[in-house]
Amino acid sequence: MQYQLTCEQVGALMAFYIEDKLSEKLSKYVEQHLEVCPACREKYETMKKIIKKYAAIQRNINKEQNAENQSIYITKQYEEFKSNLSAYIDNELDDDENIKIKKITISNPLARKDLEEMYTFKRLLHNSFEKTKNDSKEDYTKCIMNKLQNDNANCYEKEPIFGIIAIFSALIICIVAGIIGILYL
Ligand SMILES: [Zn+2]
């Protein structure tokens, strides 16, 4: 035999039933009662409308509050942070700018969220790059072997940075030699 709820019990459970917060068993009992009791069913329909309406209003309020809360964080510093974020993650900023970024991520939740998202994005990118690199590991090794066999001139051609460093070093040596020359001759 099935357990029967009284109208009073159903009334007490009604709000929870509408918000779907009852256990499956209890929910079933309420449902069964509503099927046979027109008075409770009417109460249920009315209450459902009120609760749905209230939930919709509450959602709107939350949405407005969120928009309001967020807008305080969209400052000039935040805009600057946004434009430097990618460079920060790639370690391309100077110390002052790095500190600015660290400060804003502590004080500004929007900035913190952006930074986390950017890190996740970069990590995904990195992972897929690593995968590609592993796939072509053999080519990569061959490339290094070729590089080792090449002479220095070729190396400069392939890596312009070495050329720049070499020119730069030569320049510094000339300047130092010049200074020594002026001082001692
Ligand atoms: Zn009833």
Image: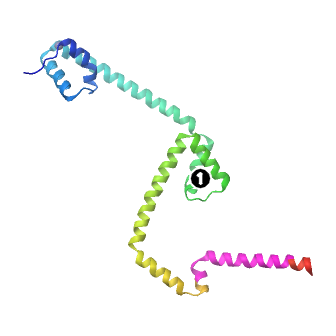
Of the 4 image quadrants, the one containing the C terminus is: bottom right
Q: How crowded is mark 1: few (under 14 residues within 10 Å), some or many (20 or more)?
A: some
Amino acid of disc 1: Asn
Instruction: Report the span colored magenta.
Output: 155-179
Of the 4 image quadrants, the one containing the N terminus is: top left
Say which residue appears at 21% left-offset and 16% top-offset: 10
**27 left or right of 72 in image:** left
* 145, 53: nearer the viewer: 145
Residue 173 is covered by the magenta coloring: yes
Question: Would you name the residue on which mark 1 appears?
Answer: 84
Expressed as whole percent of the image width and height from the top left, the position of residue 145 reads: 49, 83
**183 left or right of 108 in image:** right
* 161, 80: nearer the viewer: 161
Indicate yes or no: mark 1 CB to ligand 1 under 8 Å: no
Q: In which quarter of the image is residue 71?
A: top right
Name the chief secondary structure element in magenta.
Answer: helix
Expressed as whole percent of the image width and height from the top left, the position of residue 21 reads: 27, 27
Residue found farthest to the left:
1
Residue 142 is covered by the magenta coloring: no
Q: Which quarter of the rendered image does ligand 1 occupy?
A: top left
Q: In this view, does 69 lie above or below 92?
A: above
Say which residue appears at 35% left-offset and 25% top-offset: 55
How is this picture coloured? rainbow
Q: In this view, does 180 lie above or below 103?
A: below
For numbered disc 1, what is the local secondary structure?
A: helix
